[in-house]
Amino acid sequence: MSEENRGERPAHTHGDRPARLPRKAYERELLRLQEQLVIMQEWVRSRGVRLVVLFEGRDAAGKGGAIKRVTEYLNPRVARIAALPAPTERERTQWYFQRYVEHLPAAGEVVLFDRSWYNRAGVERVMGFCTEEEHARFLRQCPVFERLLVEDGILLRKYWFSVGDEEQERRFRARMEDPMKRWKLSPMDLESRARWEAYSRAKDEMFARTDIPESPWFVVEADDKRRARVNMIAHLLSTVPYHEVAEPELHLPPRPPSTGYRRPPKQTQTYVPDHAATLPGAGKPGKGAGDGRP
């Protein structure tokens, strides 16, 4: 399938790009959607649902930022992120999907894959980390594998974050100049710039073989990160048949009367230095004694 048909814009074609979503509108809608994600989480937990969400796309397309917003208010015991490193020597001898199966959810869990088994169809294919035979076998087995997951009751959602050539370059340069973000750039990321068309062809082939009715691909236009995040979360919520679950009413019990406990002298414990007190405009620290803390 062509880039135009699958939502991946050709390089330097940005005439139809929508205006950037204003920050206030973004923050307001993001918070509303995050509230719904918490409701969905409780439905997943109480009903024993298994939900898998794949985040794929080019380097710097905004996958990590979207995952961060999805999980911001969720319980890490229910919703966890699977971001697998390069396979070990032992894992390279296993069935390709085997190490990903270990990370699939049990009942009442959500797993967000920050890149997934589709590494074989993308970076491994383009960078020559797999053979032609291994790549062809993946494209044959992947639809079967995903049909088995869905048949077993797993809710599977696949998102491709699509970013244009110019916007990717802008983000790469911003990361290179920001010491707080430079760690996000790897030699593999920089090499991807030189292989833009190879990645496009690999992605088109991947979509043609794995965009199946049981587990379709959903393309997220990601040149505007704010718009991409709210669009992706809103879509995910719209595809999951969740509903609000009645929570048991909580009551905070009163603190029982003292039985004579006395807090040990503060000098018997090692406290973290009050760095905050050295900041300009910082007030005096509270006394801390007699406040009920252990």
Image (cartoon, rainbow, N blue to C red):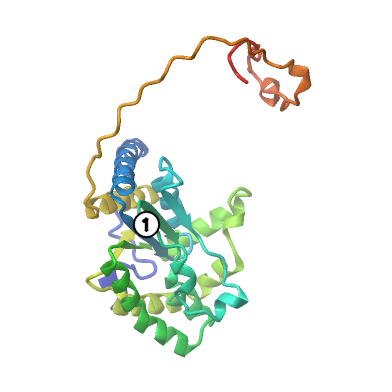
Q: How crowded is the residue under tag 1: few (<14 C-alpha within 10 Å), some, or many (20+)? A: many
Camera-side residue: 95 or 232?
95
Quarter of the figure with residue 279? top right
Task: Decide if residue 75 is in sight here.
Answer: yes
Residue farthest toward the right in the current orientation of the protein: 267
- Looking at the rendered image, the quarter that the N terminus falls into is bottom left
Camera-side residue: 249 or 104?
249
Residue shown at the point (59%, 64%) measured from the top left: 186
Judge from the rendering whether residue 283 lies leftward or rightward of residue 208; answer left or right: right
Q: Position of residue 145 (x, y in %)?
A: 35, 75
Q: Is residue 7 above or below residue 2?
A: above
- Looking at the rendered image, the quarter that the C terminus falls into is top right
Q: Is residue 70 above or below residue 162?
A: above
Q: Position of residue 197 (x, y in %)?
A: 43, 77
Picture mark count: 1
Residue shown at the point (34%, 66%) measured from the top left: 13
Q: Position of residue 282 (x, y in %)?
A: 64, 18
Residue farthest toward the bottom in the current orientation of the protein: 133
**For numbered disc 1, what is the local secondary structure?**
loop
Residue shown at the point (30%, 37%) measured from the top left: 32
Q: Is residue 191 above or below residue 267?
A: below
Q: Is residue 73 above or below residue 94?
A: above
Residue farthest toward the front in the current orientation of the protein: 259
Task: Decide if residue 216 is in sight here.
Answer: no
Judge from the rendering whether residue 294 lies leftward or rightward of residue 103; answer left or right: right
Q: Position of residue 45 (x, y in %)?
A: 34, 47
Residue position for label 1: 222
Camera-side residue: 100 or 212?
100
